[in-house]
Amino acid sequence: MNAASAYTSLEDRFRRLSTLDQVAGVLHWDLAAIMPSGGAETRAAQLAELEALRHGMLVADDMGDLLDAADAADLDGWRRANLKEMRDRWIKASALTEDLVVALSRASSTCEQVWRQARPDADFKSIVPSLSEVLKLAREAGGAKAERLGVDAFDAMMDDHEPGARAIDIDPVFDDLADFLPGFLDQALSAQAAGTDLITPEGPFPTAAQRDLATTLMTALGFDFDHGRLDESLHPFCGGVPDDVRITTRYDEDDFTSALMGVLHETGHAMYERGLPMDWRLQPVGEALGMSIHESQSLLIEMQVCRSPEFLTWAAPIMRAAFDGDGPAWEATNLGRLYRKVERGFIRVEADEVTYPLHVILRYRMEKALIAGDLAVADIPGAWNDAFEALIGVPVPSDREGCLQDIHWYAGALGYFPTYTLGAMTAAQLYQAARIQDPAIVPGIATGDFKPLMAWLRANVHGKGRSVSATELVTAATGKPLDANAFKSHLRARYLDGVTEAA
């Protein structure tokens, strides 16, 4: 087979692989959103079978020869990047046996179902056996991939979520933030206390009204309900596929703010998925670049944009009308104070942007200890509670608000958490550059026109797919590689200099 034919054959094969991935994505959404609990065992078997099929296709006997032959083809930049992604996936898959792939898939699905009951019951002991099995298998898979990649096991696990991520690079950044943020948190709380008192809107806030409000704001941002849905789940997430994006949230009729910002966060993810390059759908190069870029898109929308004075100037009347609100609690300035409130809270997905990175750093450090064997599964609650109080300054009331709050470990996603804080840093740097490069973005947000912002993101982020690395993308878009300076500057401007900013 000549080089061009080899590449074409690979595209055909990966088109089928991507279709299997999309099927699995919809099945995962169904599991988390609407599947009855009695279907758990069958669903675990379905997902494991899909993983086995996918793995078998990736490690087929001729895959290595096809990749080598295609290397000699005359390929343009997108096809060359696509071939690189194909080889990376083959290298990782070929490190694993089918039995290990199936076992890890089944164990993760089973553990996730146990978590769905353990979390509301605050019953960590009930999940120790299934989480121990997930961790054992994840270590085995991580170790096998690490040997092929020439890195350690935790780096290999992070690489699944963030290509090229290495602890040696992340540690100093997170250590710097862990030194900076607790003191900054004290300053932000002091500035907040010295400012105007916050007026909390009075509920109840019916779920139907919250959903209608969320739908209105999602539509304004550009979400296409012909290609997506909004549903409920225990843990908010964005899933599905680029042409059928599934968002979920959870509602609290005593507080509309958390569900709404959760929806806006997931809408950022959804807009990224919808904006991926259409010409490369069902090819590796057409997929999202990595989770730090993915999280940058959700955090840019939620934190940078939707908590800004400009956004709230436009959205305040819509929020007020949604709940028949009246009085100063519904004024844009007060809603701004509400959405920029800093507090030492327990729940990561409800955290403000000052404390949020501390939640992530805690999990990152614990993940590393778990994979290294320095922390036993049974000791997670105690280690979590000690670290949380040290970083954020309040004791954890129960495991429901502590180590059981996130789905990631229990669903087998180890090495994912650092991407959240890398994403927050990236969001700040991208939004800073976007506002400078297109002066129409901020005035547009103030009137509910998000087209200038989305056009900039399409051109500089969404449309790139995996044709470049994260470092190349950020450097091209902002003029420099990622660092924490833009994020720190943003925090200082909003929470110290801007505590009295008009909304």
Image (cartoon, helix red, strand yellow):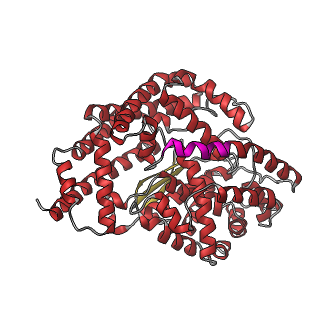
Q: Is residue 496 above or below residue 442?
A: above
- Left or right side of 185 for 37: left
Q: Out of 136 and 150, give the one closest to the viewer.
A: 150
Up the image or down, 247 lies above or below 37; here it is below
Quadrant including the N terminus: bottom left
Please give the count of numbered marks on the rendered protein: 0
- Which of the pair 342/414 is nearer the observer? 414
Residue at the far left in the pictured view: 1
User: Image quadrant for the C terminus?
Assistant: bottom right
Region rendered in magenta: 166-178
In this view, the residue in front, 57 or 244, is 57
The residue under the point 46% across, 49% down is: 162
Residue for point 58% across, 64% down: 430
Rendered location of residue 177, percent (x, y)? 66, 46
Q: Dividing the picture into quarters, in which one does residue 480 lie? A: bottom right
- Of residue 412 and residue 82, the one placed in the foreground of this image is 82
Residue 322 magenta-highlighted: no
Asked if residue 226 shows in the view, the reply is no
Q: Is residue 225 visible?
A: yes
> What percent of the width, then of the height, locates residue 233?
52, 44
Say whether residue 181 is left or right of residue 143. Answer: right
> Which residue appears at 36% of the width and 34% of the height?
141
Quadrant in the picture for residue 2: bottom left
| Magenta span: chief secondary structure | helix
Q: In which quarter of the image is residue 378?
A: top right
